[in-house]
Amino acid sequence: MKREHYIPFDKEFLLEEQLSEYAGDQKQIEDFKKLFDIIEHYFHYEAFNLIRNIKQNYAFFDPDLHPKEREAFKEKSDFLLFKETLLKVIDLSNYSRVSQETLDKAFKDSDLIGLKLAIDLDTYADYEIYVRGQHTAKEKVSKYFFWKKKIEVEYYDRVMIYLKYHDANYYKKKKTPKDKKPIDPGSIVLKIFKRVPKNDLETIFPNAVPMMSLTDKLLLWVPGLVGGISLLSTKVIPALIAMQAAYQTGETIDLLNSKTSLNQGLIALGILGAYLFRQYNNFVNKKIKYAKMLSDSLYFKNMGNNSGAFYSLLNSSEEEVLKETILAYSFLNRSPTPLTEAELDHQIESWFKTKHNTELDFDVKAALVKLKNTGLGIETNGKWKVLPLDKALIRIDELWDGFFEYNQLNIN
């Protein structure tokens, strides 16, 4: 499993973990709590500016807004700025884009529903899927007949889908019927889900349609055609022909043998029909299972839609940036000597592996950039150190006050 930048622990948990390193020094503990609190507010303010920017540039493409309200943003919403900001927030949240190869495999394979889904990707001018966090779990799936098997299924903890629909002119040129058009041509749909199977990613596309796989078709039609033709030609039709011929010629009908042969044929056809019904019913059950998975995704797994998805993403980005920055500061603050970027990276990743049995690719570059930009981190000849806690508090407090300098000058 590929290592991620994502840190799968809550910020409060990591704060307590770092505070435990200062056990016995109450002053250090209190100062570290204050520093954590101010840095959290600082990043929250940065996120506020991001969401204000992204919402304005998304408004014209938001399918949840009334068309008249959307039209008012026609000259105010810039698609390129929206996409640029969205990708920035996605990156800060430590989501990574799913490759086309992984998507193709998901379209081909299926872990849980065992159902082929047809998706008309031409509906979209653009589509992208981003994921964060992975885990595996044992699941029971139906195999042959009544046999159930436990398999290991790989899940994504968070999945975000980005869908950009074509504009109205595209569907007009294609002469697409009104009932086949998307909810609002030209709109952009964003959805965030939790706990989605890696090989069932296609289920989050809104236009996925269940189809019979080649195996389903073969199991349904081959036995039906072969068995049906065989039974009709050897049992049913000869018996009916013999009975008809005898009736026309006036000969004595061997009623017992004819009836027996006919009944055997009809019974065999009934058994064949029951088999075909069972095969078709299996497909119907898979469709029901898919419908349940879809409803569960929409009801239980959906974490945000369209503009509402921004809040989930921005909350994630705030947390990830805060966790990275505070971890880098804490390790550098406790180090008796300055550390290189590689040394700091190794120390933090080893701490996660040893203490929490978690392998991750700590984004040390991003953390050090944040420390440098806030004035808490100092680089000298490739080695990093941080301001001690008492001076760090003064520095971050000055930075926070500087946000509102404009208002203070106006008040005076």
Image (cartoon, helix red, strand yellow):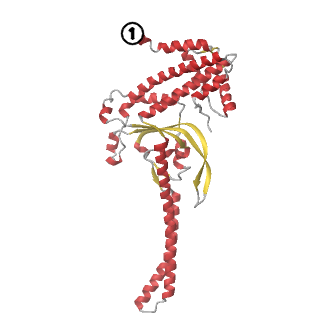
The x and y percentages for residue 132 are 55, 36
Residue 232 in percent (x, y) is at 48, 76
User: Extreme left residue here?
Assistant: 68
Quadrant in which the N terminus appears: top right
Q: Quadrant of the C terminus?
A: top left
- Along the viewing direction, whichever of 361 and 19 lies nearer the viewer: 19
Q: Is residue 384 visible?
A: no
Q: Amino acid at mark 1?
A: Ile
Q: Which residue is mark 1?
A: 411
Residue 326 visible at all: yes
Q: Residue at x 43, y 87 (%)?
A: 245
Q: Please, is residue 262 above or below residue 386 in the view?
A: below
The correct choice, above or below, for 210 with respect to 86 in the image is: below
Please tell me how many numbered marks the rendered image carries: 1
SS at mark 1 in the image:
helix
- The answer to whether residue 39 is left or right of residue 118 is right
Outermost residue, top direction?
A: 412
Q: Quadrant of residue 82?
A: top left
- Residue under the point 40% across and 29% down: 55
Which residue is pictured at 33% across the width and 27% down the height? 75
Decide if residue 397 is on the left or right side of residue 411: right
Q: Percent x, y for residue 383? A: 65, 16
Identify which residue, 157 or 34, lies in the foreground. Answer: 34
Q: Is residue 116 left or right of residue 123?
A: right
